[in-house]
Image (tube, rainbow, N blue to C red):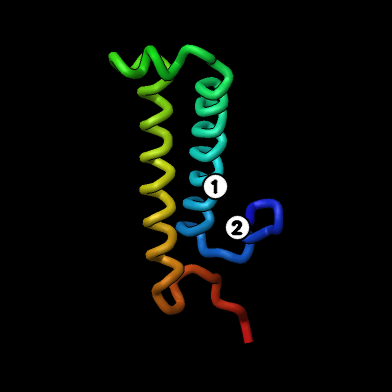
Amino acid sequence: MVIAGAPARLRRGPALLLWLELAAAVAATGLGSLRAIDGGAAERLATRPDAVEVPRRATVATLFGLHTVSFRIYLQPDSGRKLSAP
């Protein structure tokens, strides 16, 4: 949506949420890929979360929260898009 130019068509709040969602998704993907590359991660996580797992879980939770808030805004009538001039 960011590449397609959606933030330019949205009001300031929803556009900011879209950018924050992108940042959280990139962070969660990066931390998740570190976890996927590490072969012994499953055995270590069975005992306790390590230094990568805690921020990964936090970014996934942040992404979920941001997505929920932006989805609520988009479901309300006339809340997300900028008003076009007649």
The residue where tag 1 is placed is: 19
Foreground residue among 32 and 70: 32
* Pointer 1 or 2: first along the chain: 2
Foreground residue among 24 and 14: 24
Looking at the image, do the residues carrying marks 1 and 2 touch, with CB atoms under 8 Å apart?
yes
Q: Position of residue 27 (x, y in %)?
A: 52, 31
**What amino acid is at disc 2?**
Pro
| Up-down relation of residue 51 to residue 80 (above or below) | above
Residue found at the very far left of the displayed protein: 47
| Up-down relation of residue 77 to residue 46 (above or below) | below
Residue found 63% across the figure and 61% down from its top? 6
The residue where tag 2 is placed is: 7
Residue found 39% across the figure and 74% down from its top? 76
Q: Secondary structure at mark 1?
A: helix
Residue 72's image quarter? bottom left
The CA span between labels 1 and 2 is 8 Å
Residue 53's image quarter? top left
